[in-house]
Amino acid sequence: IFVPRIAGASIIRVVVDQPAAMGARWIRRVGVPAAGQFGAWTNYANTPYPSGTHGGRLVNNYANDTGSSYARYEDAGTMPAGAVLAKDSFSVNKKGQVVIGPLFLMTKMDAGFNADTLDWQYQMVMPDGSVFGTTNGPGSAKVQFCADCHNAVSAQDAMWLLPDEYRR
């Protein structure tokens, strides 16, 4: 993957290993199946892109097969139960080293799971493998901001879409 690295006012493209693969060493220990699987899913970003709502880190957008309608972007409709969207995150420090950030997961649950989240379960997995929070589970209040932000696009089934320039 080519990762944009900002140097002064210009962007330099540097080559690094798959961010998902770099995180796999810790992510598989979590007990969150999607955390160990997302690296094999389709990445809908043509390159990692900066996300202000994810700590200013560089991110990618993955979906499992059930969530493949994400590829239709504005025409994706409502995701079926079992769709999982994943957003890995990382930054590149001044030494050019990749620093892995949290993994953000959205799992579409069965109808009735949580009306306030449009039946999405949000999870944030930290680089050390700990789960920061899970909707309707441990640390649920810690990931409520995910639902609050995503609910701003409820007409898109709470899915923020890739900026046009980063779409495959």
Image: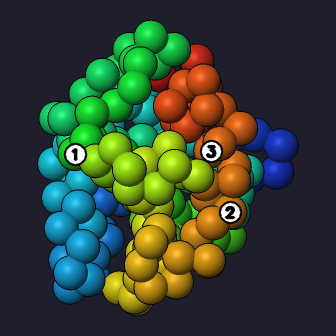
Dot label at residue 82 = 1
Q: Residues within 10 Å of mark 3 (few under 14, many from 20)?
A: some
Q: Is residue 159 above or below residue 78?
A: below
**Which residue was labeled with disc 2?**
145
Crowding at label 2, few (<14), some or many (≥20) Cα neighbours within 10 Å? few
The CA distance from mark 1 to mark 3 is: 18 Å
Q: Residue 150 shows which numbered tag? A: 3
Mark 2 element type: helix
- Tag 1 and tag 2, C-beta contact below 8 Å: no
Looking at the rendering, which quadrant does residue 150 occupy?
A: top right
Above or below for 40 versus 28: above
At mark 1, the secondary structure is loop
Badge 1: residue crowd in 10 Å (few <14, some 14–19, many ≥20): some
Q: Is residue 155 left or right of residue 65?
A: right
Chain-order first, disc 1 or disc 3: 1
Q: Residue at x 42, y 78 (%)?
A: 137
Q: Amino acid at mark 2?
A: Phe
| Residue 115 locus on image (x, y percent) | 51, 49
